[in-house]
Amino acid sequence: MSAILAAAEWGGEFEGALDDIGKLFRFPPLSFLPSIEVAGIDLSINRTILIAWLMTLVAATVMYAAFRSPKVVPGRMQAIGEMIIGFVESIAVDIIGHKHGRRYVPLLTTFFVFILFMNLAKLTPFLMLPPTSRIAFPLFLAGITWLTYIGSGIKEQGFVHYFKELAFPPGVPKPLYVLLTPIELISGLVLRPFTLMLRLFANMVAGHILVVITLVTIHVFLPSTPVGWTVGVFALIASPLVFAFELLIIGLQAYIFTMLSAVYISSSVEPAH
Amino acid sequence: MENLGNGLVFGLATLGPGIGLGMLIGKAIESMARQPEAAGMVRTTMFIGIAVVEALALLGFVLAFAI
């Protein structure tokens, strides 16, 4: 980031500015805080962590303001909160079913609100960096989903029965299990949380790079030569479209993550699927 | 040259899933338009299918940086 901004300040030296994309995501630890290191892992506080804390605080404040004193006729904040919870509840009940669905609404609502606000940091002025574009956040979110659907599968069906259904899906001719069992085990235990993690991560990384490139193009090309000026104007016109597209992606990723978590939980709660 | 390879890996990895997603979502919309009362079920199944198809493109995205 610093390289690109420096290039922008010089007035159009793009040479080598985007060589290391990682510079857009890796920030040094804050200098006035002591650096923390546990077992060789750097746990210092940097900009990403500060943004994550801030957005967590904002999300908590919004939800607290919504349900601080719930009334029969909801006020404006409560209406927003109820809309979010009603939306997630409709996902849970539609996919997991009436019997078990309502139990998972708190978890899924937490996922939805957390991911939505973390992603919104991408387009918030002065932050402009989604913490979900660092692998740790999607990793832990997908890990929670993984533990939840395996745990609820063991709880609802029993340990042996759950893994037997997972490895040997019923209604298939016996010889096919040679082919099917490895595929089912890998897809059920490894590929599901892996793609869940990667979908959120990849979308946020790509979105952040897109936003940075759009803004830097405006910044670099607009005050330059007449030929560059046309490029700058084009980027200036394109930037609201890019932002609208990113806003769509932000909401869609939060929805998809919640929805797929519900799908995975339902597949272990109800073995018939 | 290496950057070009990275770009090519991801670009080629998107071709198949792109076609697959087009067919999948097109068919899903078609069936939703024919039977609006089954829209909820179709939508759920469509998202499961998208998750499986998209996994290939995402693997390509990872391999582009890993190689």
Image: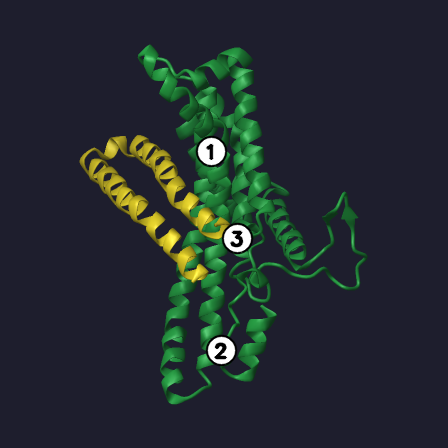
Identify which amino acid the numbered label 2 is placed on.
Answer: His
Q: Mark 1 vs mark 3: which is more N-terminal?
A: 3
Q: A98 or A239, which is in the foreground?
A: A239
Question: How far apart are the alpha carbons under marks 2 and 1?
Answer: 41 Å
Question: How far apart are the alpha carbons under marks 1 and 3?
Answer: 22 Å
Q: Which residue is mark 2?
A: A219
Residue depth check, mark 3 versus mark 2: number of the one nearer the observer: 2
Residue depth check, mark 2 versus mark 1: number of the one nearer the observer: 1
Q: Which residue is mark 1?
A: A192
Look at 43% across and 34% down and name the residue there: A91
Q: Which chain is green?
A: A
Question: Which mark, residue A119?
Answer: 3
Most extreme residue toward the bottom, as rendered? A226
Q: Are marks 2 and 1 on the same chain?
A: yes
Residue depth check, mark 1 versus mark 3: number of the one nearer the observer: 1
Identify which amino acid the numbered label 1 is placed on.
Answer: Arg
